[in-house]
Amino acid sequence: MIKNKNTIIAMSVLVISIVIFIFSYYSWGMSNVSNDKNDIEITIEPGSIWSVSKTLKDNNLIRSKFWFYFYCRGSKNTNLMAGDYTLNKTMNVKTIVNILSGKKIKKNDDTIRITFREGINIRKITSIITEKTNNKEDDVYSLLKDKEYLNKIIDKYWFLTDEILDKDIYYPLEGYLYPETYEFINTDVSVEDIFETMLDQMDKELTPYKDDINKSDLTIHELITLASIVELEAKNDDDRKGVASVFYNRLDSSMTLGSDVTAYYAAKKDDWSKSLTQDELYDCSSKYNTRCREFGGLPIGPIANVSKSSIEAVINPDKTNYYYFVADCKGNTYFSKTDTGNISNKNKLIKENNWCG
């Protein structure tokens, strides 16, 4: 009797030990690989759950192919979608499966949203980053001066070229950080993560125009530069292709662009309600100022970030004979072929109390 009792106890202990082992092994297999937050880009090809688990394991995103397969089958998450994904090693199996199956992930309470609107420059972007995150101004500007970092992202993004490294450019990534509302994991997000998230979005926005860009007489850097001027000179999407045509016509005629917004940028003045001095307006010391009478062509680089409509405008501008334009207080643009016609438009707006230049 005692022998049987001891046997039962021994068997119970063994079963419990096996259960504990399996549960521990399962918990380990389901857990995140590490606390490394660096993004890992992977492509999930069409195939079985097992082939998906192999891809994830090969990229060190899961601990066990078996437990990944077991979880998918047990939770009936078998409809994993092929495609390109950005994952990281902090994600556990459940999170990865939810992403691959298209389910919404419950956001961390620490998640932050940051909006970078169209037409702002690096100085404003820096201000927003320091306001919304734990980064300081020096974190932003130091990264923009880091040649090793800049060369790394030039290699990574097809639209970034050595032109951004010119010593006369104020901020190398000016114009290339796409304006959008972004979500980041928390306020500890690094400047590098913010920049590369915005560059990734710029890649998505520019890639559909890649063939048109390659056919253009302008380099990608010149196109983004022109788009940034169009962004600030035209207040509504409908006028941007017309404004782009004016600048193209002036470039073709070897005229200065004569853009006030480039003069403000050259002077590092962001408050347009305050007039520039004559010295600032016609300062030729900066390669940004297209009001300088000695300066023809485009500025050395972009002066603000750009919207999709401004990109489209410089790739597919209107065909016109216009060389001048003025805008009223509501942002409507009035075009003319001659300087005389432009002055007439301006005087008409002044008379109507609709001139805010």
Image (cartoon, rainbow, N blue to C red):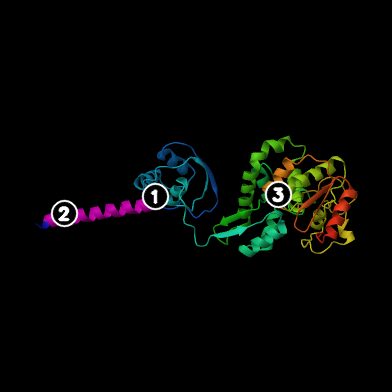
Disc nearer the start of the sequence (3/1): 1
Q: Do callouts 3 and 1 mark residues in contact (Cβ within 8 Å)?
A: no
**Which residue sits at x=44%, y=40%?**
52
As rendered, which of 17 and 152 lies closer to the eye? 152
The answer to which of 40 and 319 lies nearer the viewer is 319
Spatial CA span between label 3 and label 1: 52 Å
Task: Residue at the far left: name it.
Answer: 1
User: Magenta stretch mostly in which secondary structure?
Assistant: helix
Q: Amino acid at mark 1?
A: Gly
Determine whether label 2 and label 3 are within 8 Å by CB: no
Report helix, strand or loop for mark 1. helix
Q: Is residue 19 left or right of residue 71?
A: left
Q: Quadrant of residue 192?
A: bottom right
Q: Amino acid at mark 2?
A: Thr
Residue 298, given in percent of the width and then of the height, sits at: 81, 46
Mark 3, Cα crowd under 10 Å, few <14 / some 14-19 / many 20+, is: some
Q: Which residues are magenta?
A: 3-30
| Residue occupied by mark 3 | 237
**Residue that label 2 marks:** 7
Residue 350 x %, y %: 85, 59
Q: Disc number at residue 29?
A: 1
Dot in front, 2 or 1: 1
Residue 74: percent from left, percent from top: 34, 47
